[in-house]
């Protein structure tokens, strides 16, 4: 994985399909449904990709197996990644809930002020929320690709998620 790049996530027709099938109406509709949610696709930094890879064994393997600057993920891999990241988000949300519970009285006494003087909010909750947002953004993109493939499966649609350097 390159050090100083940004990556763009794009849904596309499965690269293993013949060109004639890659141009089908079902593929166009499936990709359009994802573009409705992600009109500019999704862009991530190298550090964000590394963090996601550290939380998803499937994503890490995909990048380790690639010799060039892009990775394609198909249905089975996307399902695994979605599941792995959902578990991570659930753990992060539990961590956040614990921080809030531990500091419930401080929040009740001074909800805004507590954010500045309770160290757990800055040291623990802030980074946990940032990780949660990153994971959910990526997981939602993965899920949008999975959903489009399922919704258009009657039309033999096979799409994949391309992670490419920009």
Image (spheres, rainbow, N blue to C red):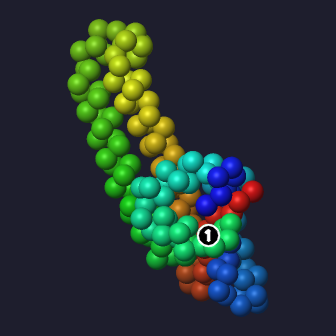
Which residue: 53% across, 62% down? 142
Question: Where's the C terminus, which quadrant?
Answer: bottom right
Q: Is residue 43 above or below residue 21?
A: above
Q: Position of residue 27 (x, y in %)?
A: 68, 77
Which residue: 60% across, 86% down? 156
Q: Position of residue 89 (x, y in %)?
A: 38, 49
Neighbourhood count class around disc 1 (C-alpha, 10 Å): few under 14, some 14–19, many 20 upward: some
Residue 54: tell me if it is visible: yes
> Which element type, helix, strand or loop, lies under badge 1?
strand
In the drawing, does residue 15 fall left or right of residue 59? right
Q: Quadrant of residue 111?
A: top left
Q: Is residue 115 above or below residue 157?
A: above
Which residue: 29% across, 41% down? 94
In the drawing, does residue 21 fall left or right of residue 120? right
Residue 162: tell me if it is visible: no
In the drawing, does residue 105 fall left or right of residue 76? left
Question: Where's the N terminus, which quadrant?
Answer: bottom right
Number of on-image labels: 1
Q: Quadrant of residue 13?
A: bottom right
**123 or 43, nearer to the observer:** 123
Q: Is residue 158 above or below residue 103?
A: below
Q: Position of residue 52 (x, y in %)?
A: 49, 54
Residue ID for mark 1: 71
Which residue: 49% across, 42% down? 133
Q: Quadrant of residue 114?
A: top left
């Amino acid at each position: 994985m390159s050090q100083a790049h940004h990556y763009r996530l794009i849904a596309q027709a499965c690269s293993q399909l013949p060109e004639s099938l890659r141009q089908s109406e079902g593929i166009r509709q499936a990709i359009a449904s994802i573009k409705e949610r992600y009109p500019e696709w999704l862009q991530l930094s190298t550090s964000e990709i590394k963090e996601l890879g550290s939380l998803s064994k499937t994503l890490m393997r995909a990048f380790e197996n690639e010799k060039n600057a892009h990775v394609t993920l198909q249905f089975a891999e996307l399902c695994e990644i979605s599941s792995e990241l959902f578990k991570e988000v659930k753990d992060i949300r539990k961590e956040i809930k614990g921080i809030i519970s531990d500091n419930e009285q401080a929040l009740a006494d001074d909800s805004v002020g507590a954010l500045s003087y309770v160290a757990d909010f800055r040291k623990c909750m802030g980074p946990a929320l940032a990780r949660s947002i990153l994971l959910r953004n990526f997981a939602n993109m993965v899920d949008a690709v999975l959903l489009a493939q399922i919704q258009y499966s009657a039309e033999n649609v096979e799409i994949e998620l391309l992670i490419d350097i920009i």
